Amino acid sequence: MLLILFQFVFHSFPKTEEKIRLWSNSLGLQVKLLKKNSKICSLHFKTSDYLMSTSCKVLMSNALPTLSASTTNDVEM
């Protein structure tokens, strides 16, 4: 599920424990602080992490956020 706000998109965290851990480590977050409905802004992903079409962009399943969350405000908990 995506929430669109201006030109940003908020992505839900993955469902598998392994991917949650990978994303959390990449962002410098503690897994225990995440909630079931936590989201991450599209600014934490590279353009190459998306499949682009004329009508939308889709985050690839192997995408990993690469830009660290400097504060908990960067991730909607």
Image (spheres, rainbow, N blue to C red):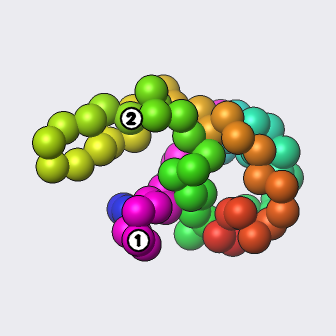
Residue 34 vs 68, above or below: the answer is below
Residue visible at 75% across and 70% down in the picture: 73
Residue 66 drawn at (x, y percent)? 67, 35
Residue 68 vs 12, above or below: the answer is above
Residue visible at 40% across and 40% down in the picture: 59
Residue 33 drawn at (x, y percent)? 81, 64
The crowd level at tag 2 (other Cα within 10 Å; few <14, some 14-19, many 20+) is some
For residue 45, the mark is none
Q: Please state which amino acid type lies under the numbered disc 2.
A: Tyr
Which residue occupies the extreme front position in the image? 7
Is residue 19 in view? no
Q: Which residues are magenta?
A: 3-18
Residue visible at 62% across and 46% down in the picture: 44
What residue is pinned by disc 2?
50
The crowd level at tag 1 (other Cα within 10 Å; few <14, some 14-19, many 20+) is few
Residue visible at 41% across and 63% down in the picture: 7
Q: Tag 1 or tag 2, which sits nearer the N-term?
A: 1
For residue 6, the mark is 1
Residue 45 part of the magenta-drawn span: no
Q: Quadrant of the C terminus?
A: bottom right
Q: Are marks 2 and 1 in contact (CB under 8 Å)?
A: no
